Amino acid sequence: MTLLRIILIRLLTTAITLFGVAIIVFVVIRVVPGNPIAMMLPPGATDADIARLQAQYGFDKSIFQQFVIWLGNVTQGDFGTSISLRQPVSDLVLGRLPATLELSIIALTIAVIIGGTMALLGTRFRDTKGEAAVDVSAGMALSIPDFLWGLVLILLFGVFWPIFHISGRVSPSINIDFTTNFFLFEALMRLRFDVIADLIGHMFMPALALAIPLAAIIAQLLKQSLKETMHLDYVTLARTKGYGENHVIAREALPNAILPTLTLVGVQFTFLIGGTVIIERLFSYEGLGNMAIDAVINRDLPLIQGIVILFALLFTIVNLVVDMLYVVLNPKLRHA
Amino acid sequence: MKLSRRSLLKTSVAAAAFATVGLPAFANIDELVIAYNVNLPSWDPTVGLSAVNPTIQGFYQSVFDLYIPQNPDLSFGSGIITNYGWNDDNSAIWMDVREGVTWHNGDPLTAEDVAWSLARVANPDTGSPIQFIWGKITNIKANGNRVTADMPEFEPTFFKWMSFLTGYVMPKKYYEKVGAEGFEAAPIGTGPYMVEKFERNAFVRLKANENYWGGAPEFKTVTIKFVTDAASRVAEVESGNSHVTLEIPYEEFDRLKAKDGLDGTASPISDIGMIFLNDIEVMTDPNVRMAAAHAIDKQLIVDRLLSGYGVPIDTLQTPDYIAYDDSITVEFNPEKSKELLAASGYGPDNPVKFKIQTTKGFKPKDFEMVQAIVGLWRRVGIEAEIEVYEIAKHFELRAADQLAPAAFYNWGNSVGDPTTSTGFAMFGPSPHSVWDGEERFNSILPLWGEADEDKRIAGWKEVDRQIAENAEVIPLLQYVQPILHASGVQVTPHRSGALLPHLMTRA
């Protein structure tokens, strides 16, 4: 199967998945208790006022009619207007997406660095106290959820040793007019090191909180995979050629052992993006997850729909990219 | 690249220095930083859902002026409207507009601004949630510094609403020039602070309005961070990143205010906790309702659960409200509860059963309070099943008159008028009432348009007395708002619960 064919099939399944998600989210949020109109009723509202509000937001129609209208608008790029923020949903979610993406990518980077290092150390010192230390650390990291790591980090690096910012994404005192919402990327491009430092100062703790559990998973899986690879013939051959242990692990075993980890990292990355909902709230980070919580509290149906669809789109794109990478990195699949 | 121990050390030091760059230093307070508990969704204080959100009125009152301001003790002051009143037959109103006031862009405020602002929210198409009040005036005119309007149907609370939700003066000329979107992007008002920078869901930076008619505020720059998580707000103040915060757990408040460099104020605000009783099922039996009311030891709940931060109340009026009557009391008397239940055939061996709904975490210790109440009820022969719901479901059920026989809720009423407490909560046709009793409907109906103020207030007190005697609602307590702040800041709390930076000074 060619790479192009795989991409086309995945794009088709992505479209079907998104349609399914759209139906589910549209119906579910209208069936669960909590009517947005009831939340905005003024004290003296009459039945006519209630009817007027329902008509204004289209809630006087059946769910099917509402869905058809909404879907028709979505195909033209119109995701509706947020009830609570009174702005176009597409502007709001696309405005927040870069913040969440930057946070997730930094978190993933940290997780790969920490998890990879732990796996390499665990393999290098296998069957010693060093490996046991790696296993215990990974177990601890995994058994504590990310939001608790967040609280621990706030206490450590926000209160006792206050070197990082506790809340927000950028300091109010920073003077820069961003032209995009990819603040970190843009600051890097413009070589604004003061802004980069400030952004990292805000982003480090939430990113680390998100990264720690994922780092533990990477460490465990990659170490297991490396240990299995270390017994294979080609690795033994490399040893007999006189290569040192570090070279054997890094150059010979790692390229093959990394494939199962890569798939897992892709899947876990989507969970990591999901985890930003709580972490962004905890650190008052102005991302998509933080907005999602407000949208749910306010029963802002158009905004909830927009966010869920975008999350679903992100998940499918990440999975698609991982699949493509897997094909590219795995010669067996590439030449199949 | 070869990594030596020396290079590793250098890298580590550089990384630490890098991470520390840009952190705020708050040794002396030049720029006031407040960690606020909610986000600001919109800058237009007169339309949309956020306009009636009591928790964000502090932002609005920093940038805009209410027509008639309220002092920290909830008394009415002199603001953009300096004098006001009705004509002799109460069919028209007049208002005098303060002279010499300027908008943040330098334009002078005129009576035309006030007339336009009122006409705008009176128009149903504008989307003001309080249009049902503003729509009571017609033929709004500006003449010199006086604004007049007709009021075909007398509304005794009209001027009180000018201090309440959506009662803000908006800039006619500027708004018409920039439109709704332009105003959202760059709002201007006549208030003590001007918006300098606004990052949605992150912070707003305010600059002092040196020309403020009420005097320039002491802090020239104020940054308000939106920190919705209570633990993060505590950390913000404890670490010195913020100088002031509010709505933190009472236990944390007590712990932190005892620390060096921190201080705290805790004052009652206009929010109350209450239990709605829906006159369905067993709640149609007055003995059951009264037994439930007499079985609750409110002071015990305040002391044990809220660390003493709360004021027990027996009517929907707090002591600050105009219709408060301290002679109306509902005593804690479990023996009386048992007698009342026995009269209806219930007792500890044959308990009366019903459901009570509550939120969990929406207000401080809401669920825990209901748990304690259910425990107290159990002792006298009431077996209540707790159902936890989200606040959105509460609104939906209340609007549809489908609340459980008992439902915990909080009610805010910063103007302190009985219509906006007892009135809307207990008058059957109100979408916020679940009490349908005809007797209450008949007693409240004539009070809506009562022109004689003394008679009107006396009437509401009588309604409150009847409600208490019949236990048609169970008022629990007036909330106390904890405000934690750096010792270098003097905070003046406002009974409305709005945290106002222009009332803060250096200690």
Image (cartoon, coloured by chain):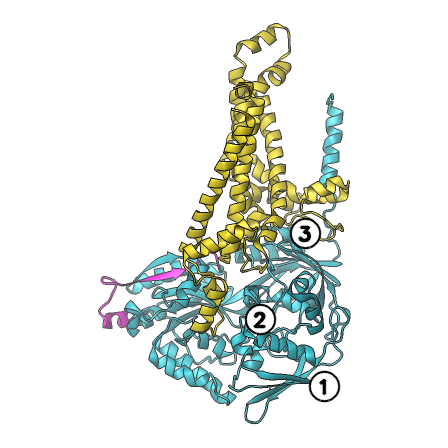
Chain colours: A yellow, B cyan
Position of A146 with respect to B379 (left or right) is right
Please name the amino acid that badge 3 sits on.
Answer: Asn
Host chain of mark 3: B
Position of B241 with respect to A122 (left or right) is right
Q: Nearer the viewer, residue B243 or B459?
A: B459
Are callouts 3 and 2 both on one chain?
A: yes
Q: Tell me the residue that label 1 is attached to.
A: B144
Residue B173 in sight in this render:
yes
Are callouts 2 and 1 both on one chain?
A: yes
Disc 2 is placed on an element classified as: helix
Tell me if residue B351 is in the magenta stretch: yes
Q: Which residues are magenta?
A: B338-362
Farthest residue in the bottom direction? B88
If you read the primary sequence from the N terminus, does the residue marked by circle 2 or circle 1 appear first?
A: 2
Give the number of the disc on residue B126.
2
Residue A217 percent coordinates (x, y): 52, 30
Q: Is residue B411 above or below residue A331?
A: below
Residue B329 percent coordinates (x, y): 41, 77
Looking at the rendering, in which quadrant would you find the C terminus of chain B?
A: bottom right
Farthest residue in the top direction? A240
**Disc 3 and disc 2: Cα gap in Å?**
40 Å
Q: Tell me the residue that label 3 is attached to.
A: B241
Label 1 near label 3: C-beta < 8 Å? no
